[in-house]
Image (cartoon, rainbow, N blue to C red):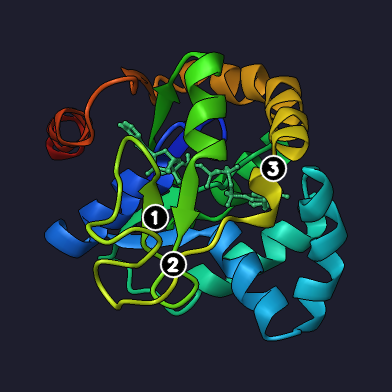
Amino acid sequence: MNITVFLGAPGSGKGTQAKQLSESFGFTHLSTGDMLRAAIKQKLPVGLKAKSYMDQGNLVPDSVMIEVLEEALAPLKDTAKVILDGFPRTVPQAEALDKNQKTRVNRAINFQVPEKILISRLTGRRTCPNCGESYHLVFIPPIKADTCDKCATKLIQRTDDSEDVVQRRLDVFKTQNQGLLDYFSGQNKLMTLDADKPVTNIQSEILRVLER
Ligand code: AP5
C-alpha cells in the first residue's frame, strides 16, 4: 500500500483535506475519529470503550486503536493509496504500522496552525451527522444556515468541540506530537505544511507532495 499519514493538532484541517482528496483523487480516507464516532452511534463494544476517553478529550488506549486500524486496513488491496487521518497519535501506534511490510508508512505530512486559530476552527465547526461533511460557521459556512449543502441534514456541533474539551485535546496533542515528529523525521519521511491558508492552497501543496 501507499500510506500517507496526516499529523497535526485537532482542528488543523486534516479531515477537511483528506475528505476532498478521497472524493476528487481516489485516495482511501481512513479517519479513526470517524470510525470511533460511528461505533458509538451503533453502540458497538469498541464505541462504548472509547466514549468516555473521547468525551474528556483524552486519547483512546493504543491497544484499542491499533486493533481498530488493523481491521480497517486488512480488506484493502496492496495497490491502495491510503490517507490516515488521526492515526498514528503516539509512537507505539506508528511502530505498529511499520511492523507490517504491507502497512509501512511512506510519508507523513504535518499540518501546522497557530493555537489561537485552532481554537476558533474547532469551536466554530459544525458537522453533518448523516454524511460527515464538515463546515465552519465563519470560514466555511453552509449555503443555508445549520443545514448540510450535500444532504440537507441539520448540522450538529461535536460534543468534544466545546471550549473546555478543546483545550484538553490540544494539551494531550502537545504531549505526543514531538515524539511522532522525531519518529518520522528520523526516517526522512516528514514534511511540514503551513496549514493556516485557504483550503484550496493547502490541497495543491499536498498534491505536489503526494505526486513526488
Ligand atoms: P479526531 O476525530 O481524529 O479529532 P482530531 O484529531 O482532534 O481532529 P479534528 O477532527 O478535530 O480536526 P481536523 O484536523 O480533522 O480538522 P478539520 O478538517 O475537521 O479524534 C477525536 C477523538 O477520538 C480524539 O480526541 C481521541 O479521543 C479519539 N481518537 C481518534 N483517533 C485516535 C487515535 N489514533 N488514538 C487515540 N485516540 C484517538 O477542520 C476543523 C475546522 O476548521 C472545520 O470547521 C473546518 O471547516 C475548518 N477548516 C479546515 N481547514 C480550514 C482552512 N484551511 N481554513 C479555515 N478553516 C478550515
Q: CA distance from mark 1 to mark 2?
A: 6 Å
Q: Are discs 1 and 2 less than 8 Å apart at CB?
A: yes
Give the spatial CA distance, label 2 vs label 3. Answer: 17 Å
Q: Secondary structure at mark 2?
A: loop
Residue 3 appears in view? no
Label 1 crowd (10 A; few <14 / some 14-19 / many >=20): many
Residue 47 appears anywhere in the view: yes
Q: Residue at x 45, y 31 (%)?
A: 12
Residue 36 in the image, given as x and y percentages of width and height: 65, 66
In primary-sequence order, the first of circles 3 and 1 is 1
Number of marks in the rendered image = 3
- Look at the image and tell me in which quarter the C terminus lies: top left
| Residue 87 pos. (x, y %) | 57, 47
Mark 1 residue type: Ser
Residue drawn at the location 86% of the way across and 68% of the way down: 49
Residue neighbourhood size for the residue with mark 2, other residues' Cα within 10 Å, grouped as few (<14), some (14–19), many (≥20): many
Pair 3/1: label in front: 3
For label 2, the residue is 128
Identity, as a three-letter code, of the amino acid under mark 2: Cys
Is 108 situated left or right of 123 in this image?
A: left
Q: Quadrant of the N terminus?
A: bottom left
Question: Residue 35's quadrant in the figure?
Answer: bottom right
What percent of the width, then of the height, locates residue 77? 33, 74
- Per the image, label 1 sits on a secondary structure element best described as strand
Quarter of the image for residue 194 reads: top left
According to the picture, the residue beneath numbered tag 1 turns out to be 134
Ligand 1 within 8 Å of the CB at mark 1: yes
Q: Earlier in the sequence, mark 1 or mark 2?
A: 2
Mark 2 / mark 3, whichever is N-terminal: 2
Please state which amino acid type lies under the numbered disc 3.
Ser
Q: Which mark is residue 162?
A: 3
